[in-house]
Amino acid sequence: MIGDVLVSSIICNNLRLAYPDAQIDYLVYESTTPVLEGNPNIDTIIRFEEKHRKSKKELLNLALEIRANKYDLLIDAYSKLESWLIVLLSGATRKISYKKKGRTFLYTDNVPFEEFPKTNLGLAIERRLSLIEPLDLAVKIDPLPKLFVTQAENEHAISLFEQHKLKKDRKTVMISLLGSEKLKTYPLNYITSVIDTIADNADVNILFNYFPKQIDDAKTVFDSCKPSTKEKIYFDLLGGDLRAFIGVLNQCDLIVGNDGGAINMAKALGKPSFIIFSPWIEKKIWATLEDGIHHMSVHLNDYKPELLSQKTEKQLKQDALTLYKEFKPSLFKDKLKSFLLKNLSNDN
């Protein structure tokens, strides 16, 4: 989704460096397009809509539209059922994707699907970069995803800060309050404790990231916070849409909370991040840019590996809510305090 689309956009960015005059198009789910707005490395955003998912006829029509563009190169960073028909009918001269059993015939180049990261970039980034290796691009590769924010969007966010009377002498922390689903959401009483720790250890403004449909859970967290913490939270400061949220996020100093789109957007804006991973998510994939200073993350496996060992991803997902209960904030409280100290000082 948003994280995947942002990370995969590094393919477009590097193709533009190597081929400045090329036509570079990007096929993504329609809901994710706001994170690509303003990217000068993409000529056309092709939208994969709900109708393409629900109707085989509409999917075929999309594949034929893509074929009509007569692409020289197709890079499939998705490599799943929905993309196979598009690849098969594309007519592209060269087609690159991951080497996976049963689908290598679809592509001219099949690159290894690595299981372990080689650098602190993380597997999510390393795997995308591997898709352009067969091209031997004669440029210095830029591995960092990027978001592009307009002056108007920044000014609108600053105006919101002023309207809500955020204290200008404080730095501002965004809380990635809720995951995309319950199995990716740190228990509400635990995230409350995390927010209290932030408020106790830093004189900051605190913003919550949540969708309007999640307001009940957001209120539960707010109501559970200590009175001294509540005084630092600006509960109603929300962007009206995803682009407005990006503008708000760009005015923040760092982000803490659940792994998800907000974290990936913050990183693409160059903001320090502290991620709390769900027990069933593989940290090695999405702990991107981990350096122990500006980007840190925690996972139950870091503290109680015996609870996760010998379990399949399916089993971990089934047991996620139970395992979450074992992932108490006290386990990583000192690490969080260290992160705050390193990233909220006036020297940063």
Image (cartoon, rainbow, N blue to C red):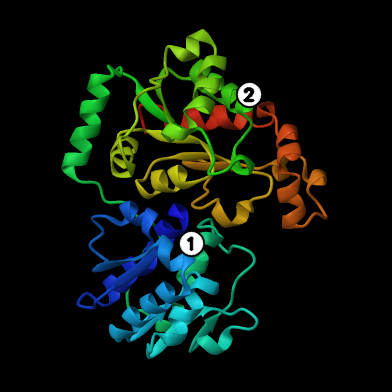
Circle 2 sits on which residue? 189
Q: Residue at x 47, y 28 (%)?
A: 215
Tag shown at residue 148: none
Whether residue 291 sits left or right of residue 305 in the image: it is left
Residue 286 at x, y percent in the picture: 55, 53
Whether residue 83 sits left or right of residue 324 in the image: it is left
Q: Residue at x 33, y 79 (%)?
A: 66
Residue 296, can we see it? yes
Q: Is residue 306 above or below residue 43?
A: above
Query: Tag 1 or tag 2, which sits nearer the N-term?
Result: 1
Q: Secondary structure at mark 1?
A: helix
**Quarter placement of the C terminus:** top left
Residue 87 at x, y percent in the picture: 45, 82
The residue nearer to you, when weighing 45 against 118, is 45
Residue 58 at x, y percent in the picture: 40, 73
Q: Residues within 10 Å of mark 1 (few under 14, many from 20)?
A: many
Q: As shown in the figure, which amino acid type bears the numbered disc 1?
A: Ile
The residue nearer to you, when weighing 210 against 192, is 210
Report which quarter residue 284 is drawn in.
bottom right
Q: As shown in the figure, which amino acid type bears the numbered disc 2?
A: Asn
Q: Is residue 258 above or below residue 201?
A: below
Residue 277, can we see it? no
Whether residue 300 sits left or right of residue 175 in the image: it is right
Tag shown at residue 125: 1
- Which of discs 2 and 1 lies nearer the camera? The answer is 2
Residue 175 at x, y percent in the picture: 47, 31
Q: Secondary structure at mark 2?
A: helix
